[in-house]
Image: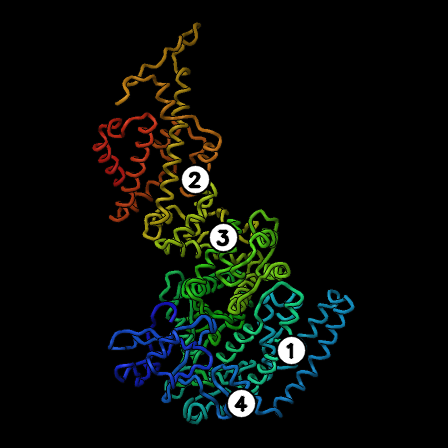
Amino acid sequence: MIGARYTVLPSLIRFYNVQNNQNTRRTRISVQAATTPLGFNFSSALNVDNFERLGVLRRGDDRMSVEDVRIRDVKEVSYVSRRRMTDDVGFDADEVDDEGLPLVYNEAKITEFWRLRWGELASRWTVFAGISVPWITKLATAVIRGRLEQQQEQLAREAVQNLERLGPTFVKLGQVLSIRPDVLPPPVMKELAKLQDDIAPFPTSEARAVIEAELGQPISVLFSEFSEEPIAAASLAQVYRAKLASTGEEVAVKVQRPAALSIISKDLYVMRRAVVLYERLIRRFTAQTTDYQILLSTFAEGLYTEMDFRNEALNALRMKELLRESEFVDSEAIIIPEPNLALTTRRVLTMEFIRGSKLSLLPPEEIRRLVKVGQDAFLVQLLEIGFFHSDPHPGNLLKVTEGPHAGKLALLDFGLVSELPASDREAMVSATIHLGNRDWNALITDFIALGFLPADADRGLIIPVMEKVLSPYLRGGGAKAFNFQMLSQDLLQASLQIPFSVPPYMSLLARAVATLEGIALVGDPGYQMVAQAYPFVVRKVLRDSSSGGARMLLREMLFDASGSVKPARMSAVLNAALGYVAEQTDGFVDFDAVPAEGAPLQDIVAFLLSPEARQLRPLLLGELVDGADLLVRDQLRRAYARLPSLAPRLPLLGALPTLPPPPVLVPGRGLMSMGAVVEAVAPELDRSEEVYLQSVLQLIASVSGVNFTDMRLDRLLQMLLNPSEQMTDLRQSLAAASANRANAQVISEMVESMVVTLMDRFSARLGVPTSTLFPGYPAMRRLVLSAAAN
């Protein structure tokens, strides 16, 4: 099992006699993530040692409770999540339908089934060949005559028509390929995106027969009302509106098309043969290394998963629970229809009925509000819990228009859900940061971890190509308007030069991102998904910064190549952590863009004092200490330089001759001239230090609203004695935060750290111990802490 433990529904627990080498005992097995090696027979492999050998079982102690025996996901097999409900006969990976077709995707068994039915298969081959061969002939002719580029769009349009003629399996494959830049060129992807899943409904009489056969009772007993016609129809199923006879609750009843399994498995057999030829052609003419057979297997397994509606019911329950537990998303703003497990089987799904409107049809301000909710939910699914909705097309995202949940975002259809292990989630966050930093070498390491590039990738060859392709999407790169689809198209060009491959799970992720971005662009043409996702990335890195990898990422976010903190990035991070980002930037990724209207000062102070910012505080404190040191040095030199101008002036005689300042008694050094003390304590700022000081002061100004730039000592004292409105806000924010004992302790520690560090620096420059230069330090410390507390 990948990730945290989850509550196991009683209906998911079966008792089995499980053997080990010593004895046989009755134990509970939770079948929660049964993505097992192909061909693995669950029923016949109930030996504990066999489970351990296969790597799908964690052995516990002798009690062997449900917490001890767990079936976990196996990344090497598939990223597609399969959630199985067990019934009286238990879970069986070799389960077949009445005709003998496997109900769990198994390429070998499907091949064996159709080889014995050559007559049926031959008729499908005839249809496939009759539609595809003329198109392939046109394609080959265009290639031979060198006219492929000119005819590309026309060929793509014909391909879409052919896929629609071939039926739902091919339509779904076309939809998956429409977001695969490593498989198809941009014009073809654009045409495939037009494919529609809507097809004519099948007769209601057949639907009612399926329901009664699956649920074992007449429609009239189960439902007091049942619509005469479906309210929606798609390639795999159609949906009816009904009312439960037992409670009167309004529900949606999803019914699978008759013979759907037979049609789809037959088409998958045909596709498997065709993809072998396509892969050979691609290997011959490009440098890409995408494994098309694995791509088809992932597509096929996902399609098979969608055909078992029990998966969809359990996925919805699990998603609802995971979103409720997340601190990064407002789960109260989201509704996921509750499935009725008692009336759900492999071919029938009964769930809470939702009345709503598609997001794309709403006013722009409503789209923006709900897209923000959907975006947060998707990022939590993808980067935090690793369990994400892989088919969020516009029809699956609705604004609830009636009932107690009106105004909320409804997430529908969890038939296709994918999982990502923690290592991939961490690599995605890392890649986002490295992309923003233009750290190409580190980005290649991330891409290798994600499976985009082979482990032995030639970095010298790849970095120039990567920089050329991705730089336009970064700040200052010159891009004016771009989106995820454009980035995908540019990556296609890169695949002609470097061994770039998109892992199978990424096609599902890309489809989800492209759909969400497409809806968002309707309400906000300037929407930039990576920029809007930055707050989530920041908060995740800050929250996880106790780990070594996250601490390193935090430093990479904030430090430049010389090891100094980037003040503008610090300001952007603080604002992003509170959900404030720049509305428009000149790059797809721009982590230095500070929002014109940032977070309220009181919120920033509260955040900095919170446990979430514990790793950020030392970095910010270091910047404040460096800034204070530079400011003191600058102001001390300015004040010393102004001493001659302070000499009194007499009428007619002008200024009196200026006498040198008296010497200063420095503990541990004796008498020193004031000029020598100033030179020692406050050496002149060089150009880089002046620039750095201004950037720190700008950081303070952007966070607090108090402008310290070009500040002389007399103005600073005047500001303290007669505080401005911004200074008053700062003091009030600190006072409000100090009312909390834990916050007061943090403030005291920060102030003490700053004072002690500055004292140590001044002492070191004079060459004397701090305790000698500041003999009253203990009393000064008490005074500082008292002032900080008040």
Residue identified by numbered label 3: 442
- Comes first in the chain, label 4 or label 1: 1
- Comes first in the chain, label 2 or label 1: 1
> Dot 4, how many residues are within 10 Å of its Cα: few (below 14), some (14-19), or many (20+)?
some
Residue identified by numbered label 4: 204
Q: Quadrant of the N terminus?
A: bottom left
- Compared to 697, does 273 lie above or below? below
Residue 373: tell me if it is visible: no
Q: Quadrant of the C terminus?
A: top left
Q: Position of residue 77 (x, y in %)?
A: 47, 74
- Comes first in the chain, label 1 or label 3: 1
Residue identified by numbered label 1: 163
The residue positioned farthest toward the front in the image shown: 21
> Dot 2, how many residues are within 10 Å of its Cα: few (below 14), some (14-19), or many (20+)?
some
The label shown at residue 701 is 2
- Comes first in the chain, label 2 or label 4: 4
* Amino acid on which disc 1 is placed: Leu
Looking at the image, residue 764 sits to the left or right of residue 741; the answer is right
Residue at disc 4, secondary structure: helix
